[in-house]
Amino acid sequence: MSNSLLAAPKATNVTIIGELIPGGSVRGSYFFDGAGAAEGDSSYRWYIDEVPYAPTSRLDFPIGSNLAGRTLRFSVIPKSDSGEAGIEEVSNIYRVATGYQNISDEENNNSFIKQRGNFSIYSNEPSDRIFISSSGAFSVMDGGSQSIMVKGSASYAGTPAPEILQYLRNNPATRIYSTEKDFAALVPVLGSTTRLLLWGANIGSIPPGLELNNVKFVYGNSSAFAFIYDNPPPGKNTIGAFGDPANGGVVPDDIQRALLFDKPKAIYATSLSFTVLTEAGRLYAWGNRDDGGFISATVRTQLDRIQVERVISTAGAFCAIGPERFSDPKIKSVVTWGNTLTGGVLNPSDIEEILDQDGVVQVVASRNAFCAITKRRSKALAWGGADGGLMTEAAKALAARGGIVMCKGAAWAFCMINSFGDAEAWGRSDMGGATPPLGVAAEGPRDAEQLLNESGEKPRIAAMFKALNVDGWYQKSLTAVSQACVCDSAGNDGNSLYRLTTASGVITLSSNDTSFFLCGQNMDGTTNSLIAWGNAGYGGSIPQATRQVLMASQIEKIHCSNGAYGIISAQGSVTGVVTVFGGNNNQNEAGQIPDNLQAYVESGVQELYSIKQMPPRAPTTVRLSSALVARRVDGSYVVWGAKNLVANELILPK
């Protein structure tokens, strides 16, 4: 054997890290063995359905909806800095999932608490699970070392026991999940066997009888985890839970017995409870009785009369959607339960209106209320707490005319827009006008309708909808087989209540605690219009320089923290540029990037993640700390915002 072959570099431990679900970016990972030489320009290749694509220098691979159900491989041709190349090494075959644990995009997007097993509100986190956060700590799956790092406040599970940290090292197959103050790690044990590791503020002494092996799916609320077992033996429990026992950490025995004969399909969460959907379309709930954990006999009768297809949640109530059994399957009825002040009780007159309108198309949630869009005329109906559940007279008038195509909830408010671009907001905002100095009390809650009217943005919203021909799209959708505003499969950029794609462009409606942000883009990706309103200091106003830059950019992704927005865009030939606006760093918010970190987000950012906190039930002037996190193409991370909980820093790959 020649010396050249003996000295050829090698790639070992070739794998793909991250969860292969549309809506995120996985990362190719490997170890370089250069026989003493440093690594040079190694090249990579991705295989889709075993078809190799052109070599690339990028390790990140975005998973679009077009890849759902297909296979993916990653390969490396290692090269040393002297130019010596080794043989191509290929990872195992991985199949891209078609969704998250039997929960649809629509259910996740429209629920106030996101239903993906990691704590988030308002907007989705990237689905790759490479970065997962609680409300004050985070875990990072590092491709360079193929290990998991956990950082952040100890009160939010940022300091796991040394034994758990040791186990997480060198295990890229691990999946991390979170509540507000806890983490769970689903780790491979042997072959296809998995086990759940738990730590955090709500994780007390684990009873010996709790089965944590053979876990298939994991879900979380604010203080407990629930999970579905993978093909348990006959007579054994099909689901489990752990965490705060008052908030869903223990599954009642009567539910376990019922699931022996009707297998679980998916588990949904409010802040303090869970409900499990079975294969037969029935629901069972547990946890806090006042926040969705109890189904009364009256509600049980109503639920037994419908074939449940979807479940949407506020912070304290559930809404089940589906046709009545043995009736027209195209007419979707709704059944609610939970706290009256968070949408758990629907007025009989609203039920009558929904059924007279041939049922609902979608239901969307704020923290304390629901808003339904009907099928026949796309009318809107809201119910729940006073802050979001009671429409103003102007909102009622707009809702009654129908044609509602967009609807989004903030913490205590909603905004809806019809096909002509007529917009109304209702509910409350916790602060208004100029942002007060840090530590100084703000003025009391302000009306969301008042803030929208005072913004002067209504004419610009109508102009955007006219320019992008939303009404033409809407009229055409009325004659289509499927109704307007129905979400597509996971990761699809199809139409929903927060995103519209017409023949002329794309409109996205985002929200955070106290503001709304409307972004219009032309079909070529250029920006058509940017409109924000609400709390001026926390995302309700776009600074002039920021607006000019974004108008000249091609916006790719929009994310939010509790009080700020983060946008990834392309600026000329430079891609992966992050722009932010909203609450500043001195206020423990992410609307300002610290000067020492600015250079790291001026290009090369692949994904944005957030660290958010749950807003309290009632509107308040107290601001919550939250952060944004940028994942760069070189594998590093930039963290900024909630410096009282997580360090504002650059995290370099190992």
Image (cartoon, helix red, strand yellow):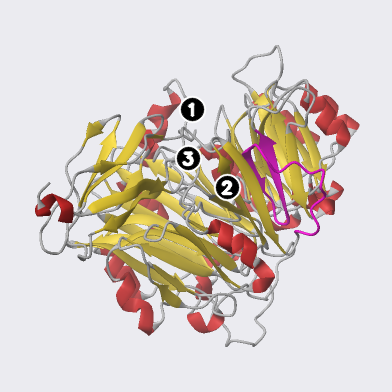
* Quarter-of-image position of residue 571: bottom left
Query: Where is 470 relative to 610, above or below?
Result: above
Where residue 294 is drawn, which disc sits there?
none
Q: How dense is the environment of label 1, judged by Cα within 10 Å: few (below 14), some, or many (20 and up)?
A: some
**Viewer-proximal residue, 316 or 236?**
236
* Quadrant of the image containing the C terminus: bottom left
Q: How dense is the environment of label 2, judged by Cα within 10 Å: few (below 14), some, or many (20 and up)?
A: many
Residue occupied by mark 2: 187
Q: Earlier in the sequence, mark 1 or mark 3?
A: 1
Relative horizontal placement of residue 445, taking residue 464 as reference (left or right)? right
Residue farthest toward the front in the current orientation of the protein: 1
Q: Nearer the viewer, mark 1 or mark 3?
A: 3
Magenta range is 203-229
Residue farthest toward the top in the current orientation of the protein: 326
Residue type at the position of mark 3: Ser
Residue occupied by mark 1: 483
Q: Earlier in the sequence, mark 2 or mark 3?
A: 2
| Residue 560 position within the rendered picture, expressed as x and y whole percent measured from the top left | 49, 62
Residue type at the position of mark 2: Val
**Viewer-proximal residue, 365 or 460?**
365
Whole-angstrom CA distance, mark 2 to mark 1, is 42 Å
Q: Nearer the viewer, mark 2 or mark 1?
A: 2
Residue occupied by mark 3: 496
Whole-angstrom CA distance, mark 2 to mark 3, is 35 Å
Q: Are marks 2 and 3 in contact (CB under 8 Å)?
A: no
Query: Where is 64 relative to 544, above or below?
Result: above
Residue at left 58%, top 33%?
102
Residue at left 85%, top 41%?
294
